[in-house]
Image: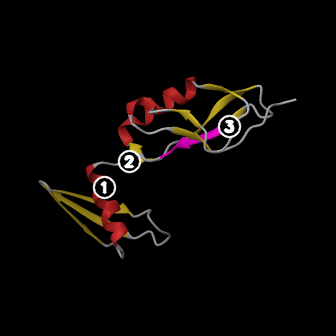
Amino acid sequence: MEIRELTCIQCPLGCPLTVTVDGDRVTVEGNTCPRGAAYGEKEVTHPTRTVTSTVVVEGGESARASVKTAQDIPKEKIFDVMSEIRKTKIKAPVTIGDVIIKNAAGTGVDIIATKSVDIGG
């Protein structure tokens, strides 16, 4: 049996969670809402994260554009996704919501722009 103490990050309350894993059975205590229970179980069985970063923009009014994963990715894929992001260069113009990398690191999740960058002058 494994017991993990977590702080829920699903809302501003930050409930202290106690998650117990006993074989295939996961129990969560300390949550004040269903989101906390779901978060606690997911965090110990299959943790995911949103990745945010920047990519190089060529010919833009700004040298970089902020990007993020369109959805959470498995935590163990963060370094693979970041490796792809670091290698990526795009040409201006860029619009918020543009897909910058499709299926980043084989996760099935796209990297999208979170900043618009016009052509530089």
Q: Is residue 5 visible?
A: no
Q: Residue furthest right?
A: 121
Q: Position of residue 3 (x, y in %)?
A: 22, 59
Task: State the residue in front, 36 or 111.
Answer: 111
Q: Does 37 sit left or right of 67 as displayed?
A: left
Please tell me the numbered disc located at residue 48. 2
Residue 6 location, quadrant:
bottom left
Write the residue at 43% across / 37% down: 78
Dot 2 and dot 1 residues touching (CB under 8 Å): yes
Write the residue at 37% across / 67% down: 35
Q: Position of residue 105 (x, y in %)?
A: 42, 30
Q: Position of residue 10 (x, y in %)?
A: 44, 64
The magenta stretch is: 66-70
* Residue tagged 3: 65
Which amino acid type corresponds to the residue marked 1 in the rendered image? Lys
**Chosen colour scheme:** secondary structure
Give the crowd class for mark 1: few <14, some 14-19, many >=20 residues within 10 Å. few
Residue 76 location, quadrant:
top left
Q: Does 15 sit left or right of 60 as displayed?
A: left
Please tell me the numbered disc located at residue 42. 1
Mark pair 3, 1: CA separation: 31 Å
Mark pair 2, 1: CA separation: 8 Å
Mark pair 3, 2: CA separation: 24 Å
Under tag 3, what secondary structure? strand
Which amino acid type corresponds to the residue marked 2 in the rendered image? Thr
Dot 3 and dot 2 residues touching (CB under 8 Å): no
Q: Is residue 25 visible?
A: yes
Which amino acid type corresponds to the residue marked 3 in the rendered image? Ala
Give the crowd class for mark 3: few <14, some 14-19, many >=20 residues within 10 Å. many
Q: Residue furthest left?
A: 23
User: Which of label 3 and label 2 is nearer to you?
Assistant: 3
